[in-house]
Amino acid sequence: MKDLYKALGVSPNASRDEILASISKCGSATLAKDAETVLLDDQKRRIYNRNFKVLRDVGRIRQDLGLLDGPAWKLSHSSDFNPSNTRSKRASGYKRSRHKASGSNIGWVFIVLGLAIRFWPITIFLVIGACNWFEDNFGDKPKRKSSSSTPSSYSSPSKPKVYSRSDANLYELKLPITGGGYVYFGDEDLDGGFSFKTKPGNYHYLIKLEDYYTNEKKAKFFIRGGDKFGIEVPAGTYRVKTASGKKWYGMKHLFGSTSYSKANDSFPISNGDRWTVELIPQRNGNLKDIPIDADEF
């Protein structure tokens, strides 16, 4: 199967208008006909996308196993699905890194699938248990599967802005669990992710992900000091904001005395990119954070 998106030079998430524009500029009549037949028919495109994602994942697995030089893979259009090299982006400040998603041994995939089908009652039981666990831990909003990413680091400001609330009626609440929060991207396809790490101690974090260009909020979640949390997100360019403090007073008052900041750089996500953000000050960190006002959070 040929990678029609790659041949046209468009994203797999491209709109119908973008695809039409690329087809009109296409120099190959065969490619133009194939793209019109498959990508401009909603039902056929859905079927194509399912197979496209499978072949893209297989390409990543083959790369991990060093199998991309096989004659059958090279002589067919399957070579279209060889993943590109991992990209990284450097700044100065906290430390972060960006990596492509990696696959696992294909043999084990088939073994696990075979066992799941063979012992389907146990599989159903485990799936129901997992769903209940997600519901218990992520509250009443729809949640997305989390995934580990590659390390990135983040540095806290030397003089953070701290906003104190002196309201005598504030009552300290139990800390939320790590990962508790909300996501706002509905049924969009997940195409990459973040992994956050925090410094052990009594300083805790509320993380907010928003669209870098429109400021539209995408996710908001809690991480206790010393914990790690991963989250998968749709393709896009993200901004990371943090609110931090020691005691929790709820979503309205946050930590009472709360420090607010945002990363000084953007986080592009596409084609399985993974960012790891370490909220741990480091001498050689490659990402800085900038103090912001409470109303900017």
Image (cartoon, rainbow, N blue to C red):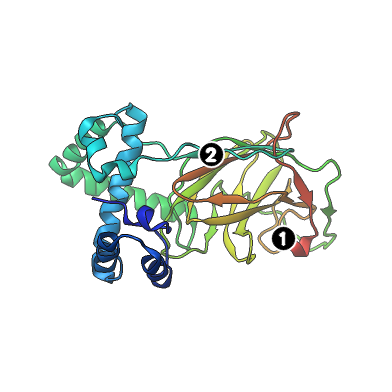
Mark 2 is surrounded, within 10 Å at the Cα level, by few (under 14), some (14 to 19) or many (20 or more) other residues, namely few
Q: Position of residue 84 (x, y in %)?
A: 43, 40
Label 2 SS: loop
Number of marks in the rendered image: 2
**Are the residues tagged 2 and 1 within 8 Å (C-beta)?**
no
**Residue sitting farthest toward the top:** 66
21 over 205 or under it: above or below: below
Q: Tell which circle, 2 or 1, labels the residue nearer the N-terminal end.
A: 2
Mark 1 is surrounded, within 10 Å at the Cα level, by few (under 14), some (14 to 19) or many (20 or more) other residues, namely few
Which corner quadrant holds the C terminus? bottom right
Q: Nearer the viewer, residue 7 or 276?
A: 7
Question: Spatial distance from mark 2 to mark 1, Cα to Cα?
Answer: 29 Å
Q: Position of residue 295 (x, y in %)?
A: 76, 65
Q: Position of residue 292 (x, y in %)?
A: 79, 56
Say which quarter of the image contains residue 116: top left
Closest to the camera, between mark 2 and mark 1, is 2
| Residue 297: assigned label | 1
Q: Residue type at mark 2: give it.
A: Arg
Q: Residue type at mark 1: give it.
A: Phe
Label 1 SS: loop
Q: Nearer the viewer, residue 50 or 222?
A: 50
User: Residue at the location (28% across, 60% down)?
Assistant: 31
User: Residue at the location (56% across, 46% down)?
Assistant: 178
| Residue 87: assigned label | 2
46 over 106 or under it: above or below: below
Going by the image, does 30 lie left or right of 240?
left
Say which quarter of the image contains residue 195: top right
User: Residue at the location (84% across, 52% down)?
Assistant: 161
User: Residue at the location (26% across, 43% down)?
Assistant: 78
Q: Position of residue 87 (x, y in %)?
A: 53, 39
75 over 177 or under it: above or below: above
| Residue 64: assigned label | none
